[in-house]
Amino acid sequence: MEKEIVVSGIRPTGNLHLGNYYGAVRSFLSMQEEYNCYFFIADWHSLTTRPKPEDIQKSVRTILVEYLACGIDPEKATIYVQSDVKEVLELYLFLNMNAYLGELERTTTFKEKARKQPDNVNAGLLTYPTLMAADILMHRAVKVPVGKDQEQNMEMARKFARRFNSMYGVDFFPEPESFSMSSKALKVPGLDGTGKMGKSDGNCIYIKDTPEEIKKKVMKAVTDSGPVAPNSEKPEVIQNLFTMLEIVSAKDTYDYFNEKWNDCSIRYGDLKKQLAADIAAAMAPIRERIEFYSKDVDLLDRIAKTGAEKARESAAATLREVRGILGFRK
Ligand code: TRP
C-alpha cells in the first residue's frame, strides 16, 4: 500500500530547545518511519515579519542542521526549503482567488499579528493561511502534525480544499487532518518554575548548549526551601525538576531523588547536578552531529537540493492537474 502523505512546516525562528526536541521533533522522527513525510522550512512565511536579509540563509541553515542532527533522515523523509519549490506560489495564487477577505480577517493569528505590528499589516499576513494551505495541498497531504495554535489555519486549509473540490466538481484535494502531536509529546517544563519550556532567558535549554551551559542554567533553576513534611505534594517548581528527571534520567535516579524528597533529606544542589549531567549526556550525540553538519555547508546544500527536487516532483504533478481543472494549459 502507498504510504499516507504527511506535510509539516517549520518556521525558522532560532535554535531548538529541549521542549521542541521532546515534543515536535520526536513526533517527526516517528512519523518518518511510517509515512511519506515532507518536512519543510517555511522561510517565505517568515517574511510576514520582515526579517533582515542577512539573517534569512543563516536561520534556514540553523534549522536544517538541528533537524538533521536530531535524526530527521533525508533518506526517509523529504526535507526541503519552502522557497526552493516555486510551485507553491502558483497554487497560492489559485487558492487566493477563492479565499475571501472576511474569513481571512477573522483568523485569530491575523488579528493578533495585526495588533502586534500595526505598522505592517500586510497582505502576506492576511493570506498566511492560504500559503499554508498551498504548502499542504500541493502534496495532497492527508495528515499534518501541528500544535494547537495552528488549528484555525488547518481549518482554513480544509475549507479551501473542500471549496476547490466543490467549485470545480472534482474530488481532487483530500481534506488534511491535523495530527495532534500533544498526545505523544512529552511536556518539558521551563526552568523558571512556571509553565513549559519556551524561548526566554533562564527558562530554556537549547539542544546545542554545551555541558557547561546546561549546568549553569540548571543550577539556576528556581526551587523552594525544601519539603516541610514527609511525603508531601511537590510544588510546581520542584515537580518541574522531577519531570525533567523523568524525561532524561534513568529510573533509578528518579526513584533515588524521589525517596529523598519523601523523607525530607533532599538536597536540590545534588539533584540539579545530576539532572544537568543527564541532560548533557542525552544531548551529547545530537550536539556532536550539530557540529558535524555545521561544518559541511556543501553537504547541507546537497541535502536541501535533493529535498527540493523530490518536493518539486510531487508539487509539479499536483499543479499539472490543477491547471487542467481550472482550464489552463497543463
Ligand atoms: N504556520 C506554521 C507555524 O507557525 C508553519 C507552517 C507553514 C506549516 N506552512 C505549514 C505547518 C504547513 C504545517 C503545514 O508553526
Image (spheres, rainbow, N blue to C red):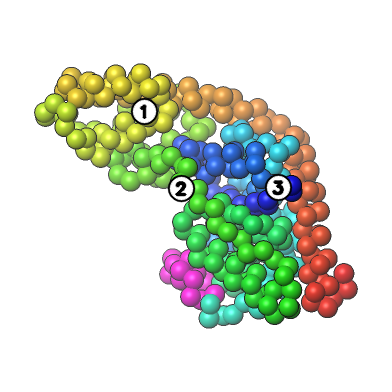
Q: Assign a secondary structure to mark 1.
A: helix
Task: Report if the CB atoms under discs 1 and 2 are less than 8 Å apart.
Answer: no
Mark 1 or 3, closer to the camera: 3
Provide residue 39's location: percent of width, then percent of height: 65, 48
| Marks 3 and 2, how far apart at CA | 23 Å
Residue at the (29%, 40%) spot, across then down: 193
Mark 3 or 2, closer to the camera: 3
Left or right of residue 164: residue 112: left
Judge: label 2 CB < 8 Å from ligand 1: no
134 shown above or below 285: below
Q: Assign a secondary structure to mark 2.
A: loop
Q: In which quarter of the image is residue 245?
A: top left
Using the image as rendered, state which of residue 151 and residue 305 is in the foreground: 151
Residue at the (40%, 24%) spot, across then down: 249
Provide residue 80's location: percent of width, then percent of height: 70, 47
Provide residue 184's location: percent of width, then percent of height: 47, 42
Provide residue 268's location: percent of width, then percent of height: 25, 24
Q: In which quarter of the image is ligand 1?
A: bottom right
Amino acid type assigned to the residue bearing label 3 in the image: Lys
- Circle 2: is it few (<14), some (14-19), or many (20+) Cα within 10 Å? some
| Span of residues in magenta | 104-121
Residue at the (88%, 73%) spot, across then down: 329
Camera sees residue 65: no
On the image, numbered disc 3 is attached to which residue? 3
Magenta stretch: includes residue 105: yes
Left or right of residue 227: residue 330: right
Task: State which tag comes first along the sequence, 3 or 2.
Answer: 3
Q: Residue 182: give its label.
A: 2
Amino acid type assigned to the residue bearing label 1 in the image: Leu
- Circle 3: is it few (<14), some (14-19), or many (20+) Cα within 10 Å? few
The image quadrant where one finds the C terminus is: bottom right
